[in-house]
Amino acid sequence: MTDTKSGGFTRRGLLAAFAATTITAAPTFANAAGFLRGGGDIRRIKMYSGRTGERIDMIYWIEGDYIGDAIKEVHHFMRDWRTDDVKSIDLRTIDIMAAAHNLLDVSEPYMLLSGYRSPQTNAMLRSKSSGVARNSLHLKGQAADLRLNSRSVNQMYRAAAACKAGGVGRYSGSNFVHMDCGPVRTWGG
């Protein structure tokens, strides 16, 4: 794609300027495999947190380039809300989340239940549940636990697994799906 100048602005420059702000419309991609291989011009992530009340809806990648300011917002949004600690979220995890969301063909944002977890938070959660791993990928900023009201856990699980790009856990009893950029694997019931 070529940049076309109009009045001193390039198309790419205008897109980058608006990318970190809330976007009201963006195209839907046909499938996650093509999307993860760069099959589209943009990548978008939509989430909200019931814990903090925060929302993000942004384009974070345009024509092969991640947008630094948008990625920083994602890192902050996916912080450990209990301690307010921020860690860089692995870009592969963000891509998997966005690809699965596009496969589900929904406009509803994900509800983020857990992104980055500090060692203190992970230890506390482990003391209350046998389902929390000692060396969780949440500790590395490589995992997210997500929910959608308009789609079942099974639908979300199948969409994320179709990406064949990381780990996908189905937690039907707790109504969420775990997505990470670790080895390709699936689990849960």
Image (cartoon, rainbow, N blue to C red):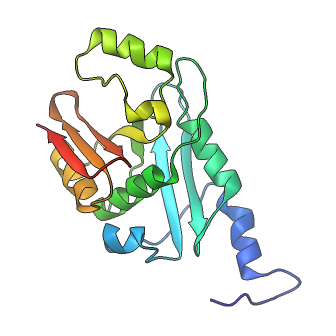
Q: State the image coordinates of residue 188 (x, y, percent, origin top left).
A: 15, 37
Q: Is residue 142 above or below residue 38?
A: above
Q: Quadrant of residue 29?
A: bottom left
Q: Is residue 141 left or right of residue 165?
A: right
Q: Is residue 37 above or below residue 142?
A: below
Which residue is at 66% across, 46% downward?
72
Which residue is at 62% across, 89% downward?
1
The total of numbered circles placed on residues is 0
Q: Is residue 97 left or right of residue 160?
A: right
Q: Is residue 91 above or below residue 103?
A: above
Q: Quadrant of residue 123?
A: top left
Q: Quadrant of residue 126?
A: top left
Residue 92 visible from this viewpoint? yes
Q: Is residue 128 above or below residue 168?
A: above
Residue 114 visible from this viewpoint? no
Q: Which quadrant, please, contains the C terminus?
A: top left
Q: State the image coordinates of residue 18 (x, y, percent, origin top left).
A: 70, 63
